[in-house]
Image (cartoon, rainbow, N blue to C red):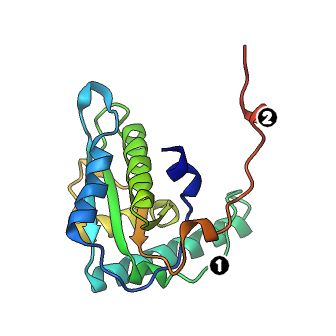
Amino acid sequence: MLAEIKKRRAIREYYDGKIPDKDMEGIINSALMAPSPFNAQPWKFYVVKDKQKKFRIRNIYDDSTKKIQLYKKLCLTRVPIYEQDTSFLEIATLIIPCYEIKTSYARDSLAMAVQNLMLEATRRNIATVCMGRPTRFKKQRDQMRKIIQLENSHDIPYIIAIGYAPKPHEEYEIPERKPIKEIMVQI
């Protein structure tokens, strides 16, 4: 398992290769193994393959970027923002993980489920990136909600792009990590 943890990267480049249904089901099934209070499993995973829907989601992502850049200029946020080519959103398959709003700790449970999902994809040599930018603002979340026809009882904290990358995970740079002595506090 540690091998997958070390191998996983946030990858934003994909080639047009369809993920077999059997692999996608295995990847989503790994998410179901995540812990949740009282085994509530307060999540749904929408798998978006439709080109038009992916195009609309890409536009939502770009709108969110513009809004964050405006907020940054107005000094209303410290979120680091950078320009990027978002065409990968139309090439990859998109997974939109959602959680039940009224279930206690549902968002936390979903985060653990998404980590399982990304690690299983890595194990299968399938790349992923989890993105919160397109769901940062209510307007954009509501637009995404309409695309996937999500009921009001659920919310969307982030989206995941998943697909085949042009090179192995290990060839992508890994960001420097803080030393263990800086993050582990023994008391």
Residue at coordinates 54% horizontally, 50% vertically from top-left?
Answer: 3
Is 119 left, or right, of 186 in this rendering?
left
Q: Out of 91 and 140, give the one closest to the viewer.
A: 91
Q: Quadrant of residue 50?
A: bottom left
Disc marking residue 32: none
Q: Label 2, on which residue?
A: 182
Between the C-alphas of marks 1 and 2, the distance is: 31 Å
- Disc 1 is placed on an element classified as loop
How far across and down, in percent of the image, does residue 84 sit? Answer: 61, 79
Q: Out of 61 and 43, give the one closest to the viewer.
A: 43
Is 164 left, or right, of 74 in this rendering?
left
Type of amino acid at the residue the image marks with label 2:
Glu
Q: Out of 24 and 107, give the one closest to the viewer.
A: 24
Query: Is residue 53 placed above or below 30 in the rendered structure?
Result: below
Residue at coordinates 50% horizontally, 52% vertically from top-left?
Answer: 4
How far across and down, in percent of the image, does residue 162 sit? Answer: 40, 69
Q: Nearer the viewer, mark 1 or mark 2?
A: 2
Residue at coordinates 51% horizontally, 81% vertically from top-left?
Answer: 166
Image quadrant in which the C terminus is located:
top right
Q: Residues within 10 Å of mark 2 (few under 14, many from 20)?
A: few
Type of amino acid at the residue the image marks with label 1:
Glu
How far across and down, in percent of the image, does residue 18 sit? Answer: 30, 79
